[in-house]
Amino acid sequence: MQHKILVIDDNVVVRNTIVQILESEGYEVIGAEDGRRGLHAFRTEHPDLVVTDIIMPEKEGIETIRDIRAESPNAKIIAISGGGRMGNTDFLKIARQLGASEAVAKPLDPDHFLDIVKNCLAA
């Protein structure tokens, strides 16, 4: 069975890189440039896994994770962030607390990222 993965990231280079990494492993991938479009794609495409950036315009990742969780409590979500800690805020920790299955800092190591994707899909 081919898994469908939704990638939400406002940075086109990052988004396209993640899409390429996932497609090279045979996944069907849908891209969205912000949380608002990502939530729409989640509702229409019903992906097996969501990979979302945290810091984005329009609708940021924490809010997107919360909305996806509210609609689909069992959704598998990987949060990614290059923001890391801004001030005293650890966005990846917050993402986990709000329902992300995993949280990964950018830049992504492709092999490590694919392992996390496989583990999330298998869980």
Image (cartoon, helix red, strand yellow):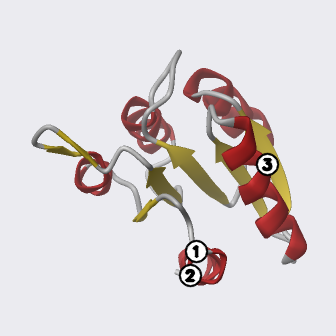
Q: Based on the displayed image, in which of its 4 quarters is residue 32 positioned?
A: top right
Is residue 57 shown left or right of residue 1?
Answer: left
Residue found at the very far left of the displayed protein: 88
Residue found at the very far top of the displayed protein: 58
The residue that disc 2 covers is 112
The residue that disc 1 covers is 109
Q: Quadrant of the N terminus?
A: bottom right
Looking at the image, do the residues carrying marks 2 and 1 touch, with CB atoms under 8 Å apart? yes
Residue type, label 1: Asp
Give the residue displayed 68% in from the left and 24% down from the top.
Answer: 37
**Mark sitting earlier along the chain (3/1):** 3
At mark 3, the secondary structure is: helix
Depth check: give the residue in front, 2 or 93: 93
In this picture, is 44 found above or below 93?
Answer: above
Looking at the image, do the residues carrying marks 2 and 3 touch, with CB atoms under 8 Å apart? no
Is residue 49 shown left or right of residue 17?
Answer: left
At mark 1, the secondary structure is: loop
Residue type, label 2: His
